[in-house]
Image: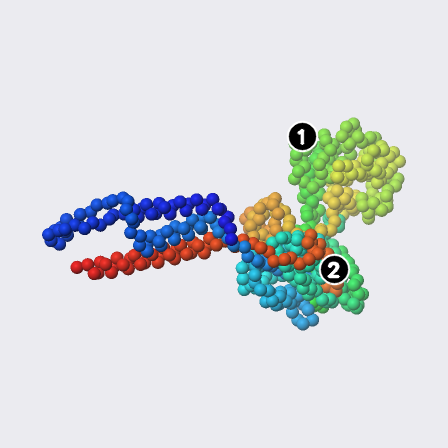
Amino acid sequence: MGFLYPGALVFFALVPALVLAYLAKERPARVTVSSVLAFRALRGFRRERFGGWPRLDWMFFAEVFILSLAVLAMAGPFIWKKTAPLAVVIDNSAAMQALTPAGKSRFEVAREKLDAALSAEDGGGEISVYVTAPQPRRVAPPFNTLTEARIALSRIKPTDAPNDQTTLENFLGNLASEARVAKVIFAGANALAAPVPARIHPIAVGDAVANAAIGSFSIRREVLGAEALHASLSIANFSPETRTLELVVTGDGKEIAHAKEALGARQTATLEFPAIPPARIYEAKLAPDDALALDNVAYATAGSVKNVSILFISPTPADAAGLNSIPGVEVTARSPDSYSPGDLGNFDLAIFEYATPKEIPGVNTMLVMPPPGDPVFGLTVTPTAKVQIAGWRTTDTLTDSVNFRLLSLRGGEYFGTHPWMSQVVGGDGGAIVLKGERGAHRFVATGFNPFPYLGRRNLPMSVLTLNAISYLAGLGASSGYRTGQPWLAPAGVERVIIPSGSAVAAHPGTLFTAVSEQGVYELVGPGGAKTPRAVNLADLTESDLSSSAPLKVEAANSGSAAAPIMEKSSLSDYILAAIIALTALEALIVYRRRRIAEAAAP
């Protein structure tokens, strides 16, 4: 036994003060009176005296005992006792939703085995319950009883997010190395590689199960000007035999694409749908059903195909008018006098017609017939009355599908050799189209004017213009969002409605972390405007239920099991309870005696 605050024992000096209080108590004296009536009239002769032998009754000793207990409570007495704190870790990742041959999910099997393991414990210490996905964390403060821990386990549900294997390995290793943890029970889909730390008792429930899955699901606009979008899906067959998989894609509830693919054992494939109609929300479903329903469904949204915003700077802003007719393009036209470099922060790319900026733009830029004497880009310009095309790169993004033989050019200019921009289209007098990268930005320069954009009325020029804008806009497949991976809340978003229907507050510019469910999230902005965002599992490693890589867990004290832990057990709570009980008992006895005395008085 010991004391946390032994200095508080000095308050035992209050006990003699209690004796002094009793010495100063009123003392009765014998008085001879002629009549009791006179005594009652005078109410007796009273006097106080200090000193002499105090008449100590049971109340004095009770008060001394209560005062002593109070001083002990202030000193914080404790005793040492043996304890065995227990850590229970259950894998709640997406793979735990898979059904076993017995018809139960892996998670249900893991919970049953954990419950059985807890029944074998003696309950000699605190029990902490942890989950693993999206990140390992404790679900609540430590529990003192097995019943509380079982209730906590019964309330845990598996998420749609995968485990981060490296993070999980480090977490288990750190947990098994803690001095205050005597034993770790881990139940999950992954077995532990040998040697297993002595403190960890693994329960593996990841028996091999055949499964087919959708991996990525992306929507992109390959070329500006086309309303139809390009869908790309990856699928996999994680089974020991060839299977024919059927994929159906719907847009806003209507079937828009369908495909069948025969995949061999453990084979993957990519399905391309080059022309799917526009829709707000796309859903892909894989058949037939299998052990894990989660990865048989994937979502995409048209909102992932971002519109391209263009700042058009020209002394003739009317030349930009035709660009507004291109689907997915938003154009703002300004004259060079009203332009400032700070304006580029709100646009994806800039087009300078007959003009050049005073500094290298901070966005991808197209220069159309820049004037001679440019000090920023260092372009050597030679004007010409008629531009003649002599050759072009046949495999370049800018020249793809352009029929240069039908391309009719009027007056323009040739470019000389440039230090960091290369020739894409050339003529008799030099380069006609240049492209290059500088400071992580793309640049294109043309010695002729493709504007105004005329669409089908000048198809070869329109295709070249669309190629240039597509290259500068960096169009490509959207990587999408994955379960368990937070994303920054966009500007203007006030709350997010998650797939389960709950609304979660969002703060623009900060990470939104409530992303453990697969499905479509509605980003709600001012006025209630909603923007859909698709979040998918999109992890074929997690979907591979036929083989789970073992976890390699290393702990600092992995050589031997932990001995029982000696920890301090405070007695202050018990002492305070005794003080309250004794005080109440004393008050009750005094009250009852007073009532009896009053009742006996004549």
Q: Mark 2 packing: few (<14 Cα in 10 Å), some, or many (20+)? A: few
Q: Secondary structure at mark 1?
A: helix
* Left or right relative to 419: residue 475: left
Of residues 53 and 560, the one nearer the viewer is 53
Find residue 502 and report its image quarter: bottom right
Q: Residue at x 89, y 36 (%)?
A: 428
Vertically, is 53 above or below 350?
below
Q: Residue at x 50, y 49 (%)?
A: 3
Q: Is 27 on the left-hand or right-hand side of 563?
A: left
The residue shown at (67%, 30%) is 337
The secondary structure type at the circle numbered 2 is loop
Residue 194, numbered circle: 2
Q: Earlier in the sequence, mark 1 or mark 2?
A: 2
Question: Counting other residues with Cα less than 10 Å from the Cα at mark 1, is it few (<14), some (14-19), or many (20 or more)?
Answer: few
Instruction: Please name whichever residue, 381 or 454, is drawn nearer the observer in this view of the structure.
Output: 381
Mark 1 or 2: the one toward you: 2
Residue 149 in view in this figure: no
Residue at the spot 72% in from the left edge and 30% down from the top edge: 358
Q: Residue 371, which numbered label? A: none
Q: Residue 309's quadrant in the figure?
A: top right
Residue type at tag 2: Ala
Residue found farthest to the front? 52
**Residue 341: where, in percent of width, then height?**
68, 33
From the top left corner, tell me how far across and down residue 436 is, in percent. 80, 38
Give the residue type that dot 1 points to.
Asp
Query: Circle 1 sits on which residue?
Result: 337
Q: Nearer the viewer, residue 217 or 423?
A: 217
